[in-house]
Amino acid sequence: MEKKNLTIHLKVWRQENSESKGKLESYTVNDVNPDMSFLEMLDILNDDLIMKNEIPIEFDNDCREGICGMCGLVINGTAHGPKSGTTTCELRMREFKDGDTIVVEPWRARAFPVLKDLTVDRSSMDRIMAKGGFITIRTGGTPEARSILIQKEAADEAMDMAVCIGCGACVAACPNASAALFVGAKISHLALLPQGHPEAKRRAEQMVAQMDEEMFGACSNHGECEAVCPKEISISAIARMRREFWKAMV
């Protein structure tokens, strides 16, 4: 049976810059194919605004394949929208009903100032990564895969942490605007692998210190971060981050 196209009503946050006050503005998008992505629906709206000589809505996007982490939006109060384990660009309009009203807002956090409309400055996360989200071992050419033996359990868990795309949904969902899940995933990824051990102390100290300097909030174990993470990273990453930090301090 042919799927019926949708009429979607939107309330979108519009804000000229970080200094100005923003507000929700109403729009209607007609003839929305249920199989198109949420961002494609916004593209249609922007095309319509341009045709009317109105200013299009600014929003971040890049790969549109759930890989880059650029497309974060708060949709009806939930980071990335109603479908779990999904980025905004992967969210399909079939998750909504004909005639629905959808509220679209940017990430809300002191560390993520709004640049324009739905676009926020997430360079604070880049500065955290610059403090230790890497290793500095000189590996030369491509090493033999079995040159460093790693237990399968550790390798699997490290890969589970490495899938973090740094989108910031964990911050947007946390009532304290904490970046603990993001930092925990990045610290855990390297803490679980032997290549990351030589710099483990410095990494934990500096990344946690930079997180605090960027004015992210403290984790109080609400678990909202885990619930909205598009890569479904476990909150156990935060526990490991704390262990690594206290080991470094001792």
Image (cartoon, rainbow, N blue to C red):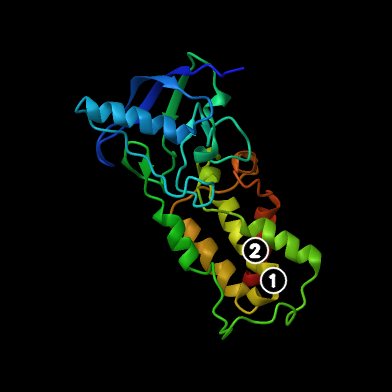
Q: Evaluate whether residue 86 shows in this view.
A: yes
Count up the numbered dots. 2
* Figure quadrant of the C terminus: bottom right
The residue indicated by pointer 1 is 193
SS for dot 2: helix
Distance from disc 1 to disc 2, alpha carbons, whole Å, reads: 7 Å
Res 189 label: 2
Would you identify the image quadrant in which residue 175 lies?
Answer: top right
Single out the residue that lies furthest toward the top.
99
Q: Left of 225 or right of it: where is 42?
A: left
Q: Residue at x 44, y 39 (%)?
A: 107
Q: From the viewer's side, name the closer residue of 179 and 212.
A: 179
Q: From the viewer's side, name the closer residue of 129 and 31.
A: 31
Q: Residue at x 56, y 25 (%)?
A: 94
The kind of residue tagged 1 is Leu
Badges 1 and 2: C-beta atoms under 8 Å apart? yes
Across and down, in percent, residue 106 comes to: 41, 37
The kind of residue tagged 2 is His
SS for dot 1: loop
Across and down, in percent, residue 154 comes to: 76, 65
Q: Left of 27 or right of it: where is 195?
A: right
105 up-or-down from 150: above or below: above
Would you identify the image quadrant in which residue 60 lies?
Answer: top left
